Amino acid sequence: MTRATKTYVSETVSRLKPSGIRRFFDLAASMEGVISLGVGEPDFVTAWSVREACILSLEQGYTSYTANAGLLALRQEISAYLSRKFGLSYRPDGEVLVTVGASQALDLALRAIVNPRDEVIVVEPSFVSYSPLVALAGGVPISVRTNGADHFKLRPQQIEEVVSPRTKALILCSPNNPTGTVLNQEDLAAIARIVEKHDLLVISDEIYAELTYDEPYTSFPAVEGMRERTILVSGFSKGFAMTGWRLGFVAAPEELLQAMLKIHQYAMMCAPTMAQYGAIEALKNGEHDVDEMRKSYRRRRNYFVQSLNDIGLHCHLPGGAFYAFPSIASTGMTSEQFAERLLLEEKVAVVPGSVFGDSGEGYVRCSYASSLEQLQEAIKRMKRFLSRI
Amino acid sequence: MKLTEKELEIVEIVEKNGRIPLDTLAKMTSLTVEEVEAILQKLEETKVIVQYATIVDWRKIDGHEGVTAMIDVKVTPKRGVGFDEVAERIYRFPEVKSVYLMSGAYDLSVVIEGRSMAEVAHFVSEKLSTLDSVISTTTHFILKKYKHDGTVFDQGDQDRRIVVAP
């Protein structure tokens, strides 16, 4: 880039750090025979019934725009789904918005609420997009570091330590990427008290809500008093194995939702029509498929986490998502050194915990959304690697 | 018989993969290897697990000749024994791979494997049609197997995901 064109890039964007995952991706993609535990998406292909519904919609010629908020039939299904699964009540007209992935939903939520220099609390280790999206919305991301010894659970005291008069919102993610940690009803109720005390808004990223394995799941807006101060963000990518469809949704009280809709109608118009038709089928008839996938993840989780502990990488049993987040402290390496050497020497790709924030240092993220055979081979290679170093 | 949750889980796993190592099975179900062994033994003894079989794609084997046919058989049931007696007479032939009692236009669905079409034709005309209770048969030869017992043959199963993603 010439100096002249470089100056066109905004200061905000210039200041953004490139994603740490990117460098790793380039390295791993250039090698052959790599077992990748670095993938943040299901290994299942979308259920055939969903793909078939999408094909049918194309055959019938449903290729025009939909309403800005998404097909009413889909919003009705989302509303019914949130009610039956999590006991939530959102009106399809006015309180539900269909988005291009949960990522767009997060972006909309932040842009709708952040004034310049407002602070937004991000819980680390965290999904890589939160802090950059806060910055792009003109806000200031404030990190809270959770503790590996406490299974990376967010505790009220940790919020108290960083909250200020400028704090506007808190981004929650349970089950968490990258730690797999699930906040149960008790944990959420404790957080709710602090949220109320400091009059915060919560953006609750529940994209992994379908994938919990031990305890019944509690959605944050289902906690007493929280519905009115929560923007619920979710989607079809993880639970329904529909990552490439780019389809998510938001449910929120009307005023907040209408603010997001305002941005959405100017910036996006609507989510892809064919994907919306697929999603209707997913919500109507996809529950059995999701149950089967959940069972399969659960078994692989049990196998993989036990095996990590067996080969000497301490790892708590994550309650949800499809990530194990073992400690590599015993190796004396940084997480980046560990991941790089493991990739180069044994061709196993894991993601260094440090890309998810400073508190992820000393850990690596391993996705167990891979076939059992791949996981077995990965464990074999990791064991060989550990015995050598 | 009523199975426990863990027993059911083990049945589901070994139904898809009969060769899964015991220690892997134990980790997947959060049980000890001894507990898994005991459960498998019980399932085998009670014939819940009837057999551990393998799905083979014979077309891949040079020199293999074989044909499979599905035969719709109409029969006259007998007083007291219904369809069971004639079904037994049919399934005792080793070339018969499966026999199902069906609802609908015919009674028994018989799957038979032979080395050639002539061999299957011979079985139908000489063994099957000559049984007293058999009223009629319709034979369908299988031209190509796409999916068998839940397994897709020639599965293009490469992982299309990008290597590292957030």
Image (cartoon, rainbow, N blue to C red):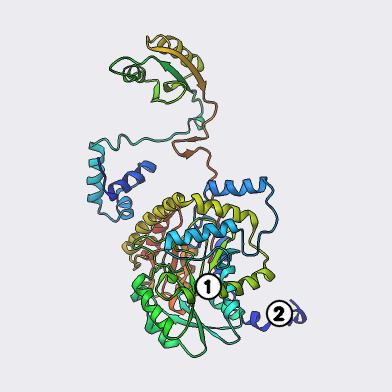
Q: Is residue B124 above or below residue B152?
A: above
User: Which quadrant: the N terminus of chain B?
Assistant: top left
Q: Identify residue type, mark 1.
A: Pro
| Labels 2 and 1 touching (C-beta < 8 A) | no
Q: Is residue B117 left or right of residue B42?
A: right
Secondary structure at numbered mark 2? loop
Secondary structure at numbered mark 1? loop
Disc 1 crowd, CA 10 A, few/some/many (<14, 14-19, 20+): some
Tell me the tag on residue A219: none
Subunit ID for the residue under disc 2: A
Mark closest to the chain's N terminus, 2 or 1: 2
Tell me the tag on residue A253: 1
Q: Is residue B142 above or below residue A224?
A: above
- Counting from the top left corner in percent of width and height, residue A59 is at 67, 45
Residue tagged 2: A9
Q: Is residue A254 left or right of residue A192?
A: right
- Counting from the top left corner in percent of width and height, residue B111 is at 43, 24
Disc 2 to disc 1, how far (Cα)? 36 Å
Q: Nearer the viewer, residue A2 or A280?
A: A280
